[in-house]
Amino acid sequence: MRAAMTGAATGIGAITAQKLRARGYEVVAFDISEPAHVDQWVRVDLSDPDAIRQATAQVSGHFDCLINNAGLPPRAGLEKTILSVNFLGLVQMTNALVPKLAEGASIVNTASRAGAAWRENIDEVKALMAVSDPGGIDAFIESRRINHIRAYNLSKEAVIVWTMAQTERMIAADLRMNTVSPAAVSTGILGDFATAFGERMAVNIARVGRPGLPEEIADVIVFLASADSHWIKGSDLIIDGGMSALATTDQLGL
């Protein structure tokens, strides 16, 4: 078995790579930083479409799964890079590797609970999905006054919507694609989310008892990447310790 993945150097991605190799996968990592626990590293800047094309051209053979895990947290001043890597780069990487996927292969995209409001923001999500390359991102950010927090949330909303929208295409190609949406996870970038989301995140963590662990997210990613989940297609799996359920029941007055 053979896995392609992005974002394998740290956090959830590093644990996922370890778990895949423990299951017997050969792991080929596409990353800007060199990861450990992989069989091959292909350096790539996911904000650069040319770099993506060059990187994916370096690998041959077929993959049984593709895990798009790379992403940037909500950091001030990185609005363009966040949108370029978290969404546009994910789409371009997926499209470049689809011809290299084996029949029945699984694609898993890491989204976020921060993307849960995609329904309310669908017009803006569609507008981002209409941007074909990073060259159009500057005008998009300026016209819509996108700050770093909105850039992050929007990038994850778009990942969820785009993944669903690709379901028919995937079925026709004998492939499948799903998203995972973690909430607060105890990795090196948890502080970025605490700064961005503040008291709201602190309250949510307190209500469920703790942040998630990267191993807990990686387990779900590996499951979705495997044949064990073959009938799950176009779905978004929320992994948040109950945060979404609590928020929904609060709204319902239950």
Image (spheres, grey):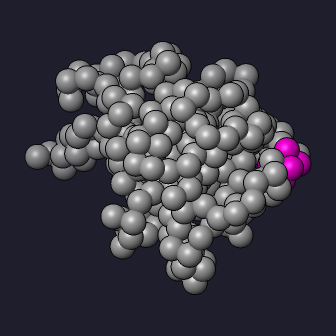
* Magenta-drawn segment: 50-54
The x, y position of residue 254, in whole percent, is 11, 46
Q: Residue at x 25, y 23 (%)?
A: 210
Query: Where is residue 74 drawn, in percent x and y?
Result: 59, 27
Residue placed furthest toward the left: 254
- Residue plotted at (32% across, 37% down): 216
> Could you tell me residue 114's position as x and y percent?
46, 40
Does 26 sit above or below residue 70? below
Residue that appears at 58% across and 28% down: 36
Residue 147 lies left or right of residue 164; in this view the side is right
* Residue 59 appears in the picture as rendered: yes
Q: Is residue 109 among what the camera can see?
A: no
Task: State which quadrant residue 22 falls in.
Answer: top left
Left or right of 10? Residue 180 is: left
Q: Which residue occupies 34% across, 29% down?
A: 213
Instruction: Judge by depth and name the residue closer to the eye, 245 or 180.
Output: 180
